[in-house]
Image (spheres, rainbow, N blue to C red):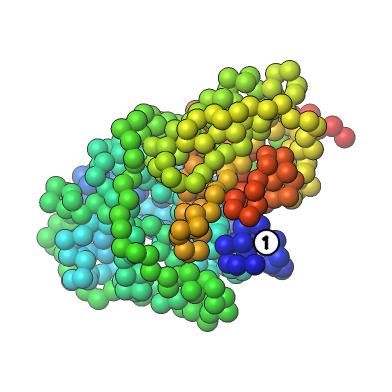
């Protein structure tokens, strides 16, 4: 079993005695001495506005145990990704709790750069999930990256690039992390726009050393050498566009529904009041996935999807879709929906869910294991985020699901498990727990 397999089909080999349900506290509390780097929000530049809008809490539901909603999944705050900005050498972090950018310091090394960085204190999630926490954190990066890409494109920053092969060791320390515990999820380079953006006022341009984090988790992460190896791996320097095709702009309109993104978390459990869907609706999701892959991940991304739905005639159908569009629709034999997930006993009524989407990645034999791990998880997270926006537009919930049952689904949709793996899934339905009748 290699590390890619460990993070995908063998992820359940890890026994873990912690419960992440206890962990509903805030992140972002472990830095001292930072300050609001730009308290005047009235004329905040558009890059900061974009970062703030993706990372801030947007909705509060007092009757919901998962009360703080962002436009990207909060995953109970267990998932630790944060946003950092480098603006012509000045480094700041967005603190979601305080809803402010905190100045961490200045580094001459980054003069002339305008970067948005997604990075995480990896140990925060690894203490619940062990090395598999890396996979969850990268999926999270995908959700965030998709949303940031859509927003950048929507605001006219089409020349933004994803940057690979940066000196991550240096970057990690410049962001205040200790050397082994942080994962740089993505670096989005907007340096082409550096002369067009108004940064800080002169009075805020105080050059200081970098604030470091209060706690250092190097020892704990050190017990997972494969994770350390992944964190220290340096890609070949290259850039990728944020979108591959002019048609990408079309998908930005779904951002209008971001505030209604809903993963269906509430006290009674997860079930859908709509149990069947018109075939046209399922096909629309398949087309949306094809477009996202083609426009945002590119023709050679290696992704395809299985869209399983219960049609109006009560029968189950499976649509297979890739960047080229719908490849086929098959009627399925009896589906045991409870078997699609591992934890359906935990208040999830899978029989009521009309639409389940599985994201599959074909391993690229010409890329390194590290690149495959990164591309598989971040790409799947991106597609899932777009699915969530499509669902929000329809008034549906879309719950991203990592604990699907690989063996059952592999057989159902026909995976060649030597070169393909199911990376992520989303279950979609309509929430109305007040009127749902449980069959006892
Ligand atoms: C990478 C990832 C994996 C997830 N896996 C599961 C899962 O296996 N089961 C589940 O019930 N929810 C899963 N979720 C959904 C989270 O539980 C959900 O995001 C969280 O509870 C908070 O709700 P919110 O998305 O509305 O903020 C996952 C979310 C993410 C980002």
- On the image, the x and y values in percent for residue 179 come to 41, 77
Tell me the quarter of the picture where residue 354 sits.
Answer: top right
433 or 115, which is in the foreground? 115
The residue lying at 29 percent from left, 68 percent from top is 104
The residue lying at 74 percent from left, 30 percent from top is 332
44 relative to 118 in the view: left or right: left
The residue lying at 51 percent from left, 44 percent from top is 303
Tell me the quarter of the picture where residue 347 sits.
Answer: top right
The number of callouts visible is 1
- Is residue 430 at all visible to an observer of this figure? no
Say above or below: 384 vs 221: above
Q: Secondary structure at mark 1?
A: loop
- On the image, the x and y values in percent for residue 59 come to 49, 41
Say above or below: 260 vs 369: above
Q: Which residue corresponds to mark 1?
A: 10
24 or 5, which is in the foreground? 5
- On the image, the x and y values in percent for residue 111 come to 17, 65
- On the image, the x and y values in percent for residue 181 come to 46, 73
Say above or below: 194 vs 58: below
5 or 285, which is in the foreground? 5
Tell me the quarter of the picture where residue 182 sits.
Answer: bottom left
93 or 322, which is in the foreground? 322
The C terminus lies in which quarter of the figure?
Answer: top right
398 relative to 325 in the view: left or right: right
């Amino acid at each position: 079993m290699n590390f890619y397999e460990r993070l995908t089909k063998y992820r359940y080999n890890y026994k873990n005695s912690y419960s992440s349900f206890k962990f509903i506290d805030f992140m972002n509390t472990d830095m001292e001495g930072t300050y609001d780097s730009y308290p005047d929000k009235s004329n905040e530049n558009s890059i900061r506005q974009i970062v703030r809008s993706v990372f801030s809490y947007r909705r509060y539901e007092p009757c919901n145990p998962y009360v703080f909603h962002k436009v990207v999944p909060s995953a109970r705050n267990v998932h630790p990704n944060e946003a950092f900005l480098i603006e012509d050498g000045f480094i700041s972090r967005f603190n979601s709790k305080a809803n402010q950018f905190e100045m961490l310091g200045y580094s001459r090394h980054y003069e002339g750069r305008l970067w948005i960085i997604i990075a995480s204190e990896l140990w925060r999630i690894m203490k619940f999930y062990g090395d598999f926490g890396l996979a969850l954190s990268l999926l999270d990066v995908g959700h965030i990256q998709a949303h940031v890409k859509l927003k950048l494109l929507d605001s006219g920053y089409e020349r933004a690039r994803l940057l690979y092969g940066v000196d991550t060791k240096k970057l990690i320390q410049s962001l205040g992390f200790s050397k082994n515990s942080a994962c740089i999820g993505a670096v989005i380079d907007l340096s082409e726009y550096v002369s067009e953006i108004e940064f800080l006022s002169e009075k805020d341009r105080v050059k200081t050393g970098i604030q470091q984090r209060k706690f250092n988790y190097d020892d704990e992460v050190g017990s997972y050498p494969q994770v350390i190896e992944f964190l220290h791996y340096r890609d070949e320097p290259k850039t990728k566009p944020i979108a591959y095709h002019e048609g990408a702009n079309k998908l930005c309109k779904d951002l209008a529904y971001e505030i209604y993104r809903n993963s269906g978390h509430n006290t009674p459990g997860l079930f859908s009041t709509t149990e069947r869907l018109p075939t046209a609706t399922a096909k629309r999701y398949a087309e949306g996935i094809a477009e996202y892959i083609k426009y945002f991940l590119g023709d050679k991304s290696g992704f395809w999807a299985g869209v399983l739905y219960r049609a109006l005639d009560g029968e189950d159908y499976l649509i297979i879709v890739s960047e080229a569009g719908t490849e086929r629709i098959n009627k399925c034999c009896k589906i045991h929906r409870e078997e699609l997930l591992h934890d359906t006993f935990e208040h999830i009524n899978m029989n009521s869910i009309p639409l389940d989407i599985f994201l599959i990645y074909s391993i690229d034999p010409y890329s390194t294991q590290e690149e495959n791990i990164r591309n598989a998880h971040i790409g799947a997270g991106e597609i899932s985020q777009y699915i969530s926006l499509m669902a929000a537009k329809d008034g549906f919930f879309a719950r991203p699901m990592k604990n699907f049952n690989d063996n059952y689904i592999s057989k159902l949709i026909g995976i060649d498990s030597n070169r393909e793996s199911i990376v992520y899934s989303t279950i979609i339905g309509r929430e109305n727990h007040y009127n749902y009748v449980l069959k006892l």
